[in-house]
Image: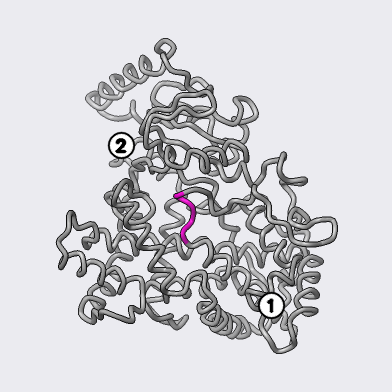
């Protein structure tokens, strides 16, 4: 009704156009049964579809409610767009593992089309996506991702983070402080060098990433994605594009520098590797050049955003949860102390001897459901679980529904490290643990994220005990309503780091 009121407040020509859209939408959604069997779902209204039934701030929770009524596979109408939603461990895993090629594409999301124009690693499709992703994974591995050689770099960054925390001398400081270290690891891989935490470029990038992520979670931005032809009514997507362009300016400077200092061996960064691949392709002149400047910038931009936000936000949640559950924090510290020698840092290999600590880290990722879902798209006409899903249909595999699936977790809505422990207290990996998604579109940086989370989390608890500020009890810390951005961030809160030395 709010949308109709908005339309009627504009001149007659606009009202006539909206009336025409209304009629077309009505007949398109109210026609007889299709020759193919679509998944069930709530009946859509003209123009708005099922938007009136969604909580725009927590769409993932709305999807869980629909699943109770319509089953694990159902249809929703986001405005004029029809989407198939997959919920629960069985359905999501079936789609992403057994139908990985059928559900491998990304739908054309308007805001990302405006930002990337079909380029980059995450929202591209076809040959461009396959080639860019394969190259990116190989390049990041060459730079140490998933290898022990990167462990020393993470431990060194941990030292810088600890020094910045010690400077607060036990006084309260914001959780956002913990974003610096994991962000710097990503930047070092992308650009070749870490930043000083007070570097103007580093602070500018942190601020821009924060603003972009907040805007991506804006309800008005969702409306732009549903009705891009009404973009002139909205401002959030315009502000977002401006912020992204400011990030691009910094990236272009690094690409320009890399081209000037191009070397044929000893590539120090992902940017260097991209520039080298571009020149190599130009020399060979074989087929279409996929590593053009637009794809270079877009690929780096993807990793600047996604490669920093996820791990940095998870680390904030980790500290907040340790404040909320001090007995769990104490048990982690006792276990690390019994395995790791005094004056030594926990190594990544030590996780095998630290089952409780490992379980806590996994439970943090499960409990926070950091990235509720990233849409897929059918690459071909697909028959799935008795339904027909045409090529080009948006498909939403709900990771929240998997991580909170009551058939897979004893207490899905409680923070319980026991989900990953057997009766003897040994760590148990669960198939339903899929915060990084599955299949060919799974997170490329999974191995890096796992190493960072373990080393940063264990190292911080070796050195500090995290407590709420004076006057706030641990039980008063609210974990129920996170701040919705592109990921589910915790609300801005303060912590105190008490030295254990």
Question: Gap between marks 2 and 1, in whole Å?
Answer: 48 Å
Where is residue 13 drawn, in percent x and y? 22, 25
Q: Which residue is mark 1?
A: 497
N-terminal of the pair, mark 2 or mark 1, is 2
Would residue 5 be seen by someone viewing this image from the given angle? Answer: no
Check the image and name the residue furthest to the top: 32
* The C terminus sits in image quarter: bottom right
Magenta segment: 440-444
Q: Residues within 10 Å of mark 1 (few under 14, many from 20)?
A: many
Above or below, 441 relative to 74: below
| Magenta residues, dominant SS class | loop
Q: Residue at x 40, y 81 (%)?
A: 193
Q: Is residue 160 left or right of residue 228?
A: right
Residue to which mark 2 is pinned? 230
Relative vertical location of residue 431 with respect to residue 185 in this rendering, above or below:
above
User: Coloured how?
Assistant: one colour
Tally the marks: 2
Marker disc for residue 62: none
């Amino acid at each position: 009704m709010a949308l109709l009121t908005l339309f009627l407040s504009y001149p007659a020509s606009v009202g006539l156009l909206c009336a025409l859209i209304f009629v077309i939408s009505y007949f398109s959604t109210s026609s007889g049964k299709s020759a193919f069997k679509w998944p069930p779902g709530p009946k859509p209204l003209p123009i708005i579809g099922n938007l009136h039934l969604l909580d725009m701030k927590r769409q993932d929770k709305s999807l869980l409610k629909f699943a109770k009524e319509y089953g694990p596979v159902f249809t929703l109408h986001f405005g004029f767009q029809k989407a198939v939603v997959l919920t629960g461990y069985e359905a999501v895993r079936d789609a992403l593992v057994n139908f990985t090629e059928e559900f491998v594409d990304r739908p054309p999301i308007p805001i990302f089309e405006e930002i990337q124009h079909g380029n980059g690693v995450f929202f591209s499709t076809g040959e461009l996506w396959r080639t860019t992703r394969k190259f990116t994974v190989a390049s990041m591995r060459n730079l140490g991702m998933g290898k022990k050689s990167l462990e020393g770099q993470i431990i060194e960054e941990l030292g810088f983070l600890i020094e910045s925390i010690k400077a607060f001398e036990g006084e309260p400081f914001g959780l956002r402080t913990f974003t610096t270290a994991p962000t710097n690891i990503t930047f070092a891989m992308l650009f070749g060098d870490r930043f000083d935490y007070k570097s103007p470029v580093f602070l500018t990038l942190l601020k821009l990433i924060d603003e972009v992520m907040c805007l991506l979670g804006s309800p008005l931005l969702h409306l732009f994605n549903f009705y891009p032809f009404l973009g002139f009514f909205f401002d959030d997507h315009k502000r977002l594009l401006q912020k992204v362009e400011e990030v691009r300016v910094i990236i272009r400077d690094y690409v320009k520098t890399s081209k000037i200092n191009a070397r044929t061996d000893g590539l120090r960064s992902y940017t260097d590797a991209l520039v080298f691949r571009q020149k190599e392709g130009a020399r060979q002149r074989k087929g279409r050049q996929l590593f053009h400047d637009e794809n270079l910038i877009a690929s780096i931009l993807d990793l600047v955003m996604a490669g920093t936000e996820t791990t940095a936000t998870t680390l904030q949640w980790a500290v907040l949860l340790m404040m909320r559950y001090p007995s769990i924090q104490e048990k982690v510290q006792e276990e690390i102390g019994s395995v790791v020698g005094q004056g030594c840092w926990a190594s990544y290999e030590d996780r095998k001897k630290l089952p409780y600590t490992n379980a806590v880290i996994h439970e943090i990722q499960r409990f926070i459901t950091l990235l509720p879902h990233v849409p897929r798209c059918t690459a071909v006409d697909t028959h799935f679980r008795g339904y027909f899903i045409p090529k080009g249909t948006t498909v939403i595999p709900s990771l929240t529904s998997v991580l909170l699936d009551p058939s897979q977790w004893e207490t899905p809505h409680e923070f319980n490290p026991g989900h990953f422990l057997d009766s003897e207290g040994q760590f148990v990996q669960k198939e339903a643990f899929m915060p990084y998604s599955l299949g060919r579109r799974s997170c490329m940086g999974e191995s890096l994220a796992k190493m960072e989370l373990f080393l940063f989390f264990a190292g911080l608890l070796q050195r500090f005990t995290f407590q709420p500020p004076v006057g706030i009890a641990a039980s008063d810390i609210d974990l129920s309503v996170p701040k919705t951005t592109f990921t589910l961030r915790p609300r801005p809160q303060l912590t105190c780091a008490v030295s254990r030395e």
